[in-house]
Amino acid sequence: MADFSNKKVLVVGLGGRGRAACGLLRRCGAFVVGVDHADSAALQANTAPLKAVGVDVRLAVASVPPLSFDLAVISPEVPPESPLYRDVLARGLPVMGELELGSEMAHCLSLVITGTNGKGTVAELVERFLRADGRRALTAGHRARPVCSIAEQTTELDFLILQVKAQQLELSKSLRPSVAVLMNASSDHLDRYASADDYVRTYAAVFRNQQPFDWAVIQSEALERLRALNIPVPGKLVTFSATDNTADLYLDRGLILSRLPNWEGPLLDTTQCELRGPHNAENLMAALAVGHVLHVPLDAMVESARTYVAGAHRFEPVTTVNGVRYINDSKATNLDALCQALRTIQPAPGGRPNIWLIAGGRGKGLDYHGAGPLLTQRVKGIFLIGEEAENLRAAWGLFTPCTPVGSLLEAVAEAARHASEGDVILLSPACSSFDQFRDYQHRGEVFCQAAKTIYGGVASGNPKIHGG
C-alpha cells in the first residue's frame, strides 16, 4: 500500500471523484492542492469542506501552480486535451488516476466491472449475489460513490465491486482485479478517443496486470475486438453472449445455459425475471459467471436475480395514460443502449412499429446511421431535443419521421398528442444530458414528471402538461 504521508500532491479536477481523492489524500497525511478550471457558486460550496480540512483549493486555474509536487492525481472528468492535463504532462509529473489511488488504498479483493453499457446493473446484481451468500460486499467507483470516498471502509469487506468507465482506466498502471468483467465494447465517447479501437484498448487495461489464476469474464463480441487488436487476456476466461451460442454462457429461448465444466446445463429462466431483453440477459449472464467463480451457490443467485429490479432511468416503466406506456431510459447515452431499448419493446400486432422515440442531447462523436434499419422496424416517429438534434435528423430522417423540438417537455407533449393505444413513448436519448440538464438523472426526472402530469389524454387530441 502506498504511503502518502508528507507527500505534496496535486489533484486536477474537483468534481465528486476529485474531491473524494483530495479527502483521502489528506486523511493519509498528504499536503494537497486541488485545482479546477471552473469556478461557480456550486463548485465553491462543494469544495468548502476541503478547505476546512486543509486542502489548498484553487478554482479558475488553467495551469499547474508554480509549486513542487511529488504526484498529480487526475480526475476522469478532466479531458486529456484540457490545458491543466497538458500542463501536468509537460512538467513531467508522475501521474495517477483517481481509480488507481482509491484501489491502491483498499484492503480487500477487488472486482472490476466495465464496458460501454450494463456495468451498473451487473455491479448491483453481483453485490446482491454476494450478500445473499453472506459475503460482505460494496459497490463503488461510480459517481454516487467514488472509490476514494470508501477506501478506508474496505477493512470490513470481503469484496470491493468497482463499477468503472473507460475514462477511469486511462491512467491505470497497477490495477489488478481478482475478477474483471468486460460487458461490451460498442462505440462511445468518440469525442474523447481518436478511434473506436483506442476506446477498446482503454478498456483492455482492466486485464493488463491479471495473473493466470485471476478471472476474466468477457462478452464474446468484446473478446473478438480484443483479439483483433492482439490484446492478451492472461486470466482464466469465461465468455457470455445473448447471440453467440458457442459462448460459455449463452441464451436459448429465454434460458441462460452454461457449458462450463461441472456447471453444465440451464442456470436461469429469464422469463421469470423482472429484467427484460437480450441485453439484460447478458447482464444476468455476467453476474452469474462472477458469482460462479466466487463459489456463490446457484440457488442463492437465481432467487436474487428473479427479484432484482433495475434502478431508475434504466428502461424504467413510468406510467400508462390512455393505453400509452411511458418508459424512461435516460441512462441510454449511446447508440448501442438505444438499440437495446428498441429491441426490448414488443412491436404492435403484425410487427408494426409502435414506439414514439425521444432522443438527443449533447453528442459524443458517434455515427448514428447504424440504427436506421431498426428505427424503420420499431419506431413510428422521433422527437429530437438538444444540441445534437440536427445531426440525428440527418442520420435518421430517411428511416422514420424526425421532428426537432425546443425542449423535453415539448417532446413529451408532442409524442402524447400523436400516440394511440398500444404505443410506447420512450425516452432513450443516445446522447449525454449536459447541454440541458445536470445529468441523466435530472433528464429522467423531468421526463417522469411530464409523463405523470399529462391529463386529457390523446383521445381529446390536446394533452396538457403541468409543471416542468
Image (tube, grey):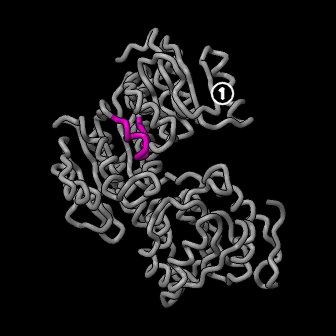
Q: Quadrant of residue 43?
A: top right
Q: Residue most toward the bottom?
A: 350
Measured along the vertical axis of the image, is residue 466 above or below residue 148? below
Q: Nearer the viewer, residue 345 or 394?
A: 394
Is 78 left, or right, of 265 in this rendering? Answer: right
Q: Nearer the viewer, residue 230 or 267?
A: 230
Q: Where does the image place residue 101, in percent across and percent down from the top left?
A: 42, 26
Q: Where does the image place residue 429, in percent across and percent down from the top left?
A: 57, 65
- The residue tagged with tag 1: helix, strand or loop? helix
The stretch in magenta equals 161-172
Residue type, label 1: Thr
Which quadrant: the N terminus?
top left
Q: Residues within 10 Å of mark 1 (few under 14, many from 20)?
A: many
Q: Could you tell me which residue is drawn at 47 percent across and 84 percent down?
A: 377
Which residue is identified by label 1? 47
Q: Note whether residue 221 is visible.
A: yes
Count of all numbered marks drawn on residues in the image:
1
Is 92 left, or right, of 356 in this rendering? Answer: left
Q: Note whether residue 139 is visible.
A: no
Q: Where does the image place residue 285, in percent across and percent down from the top left?
A: 34, 55
Q: Residue most toward the top?
A: 6
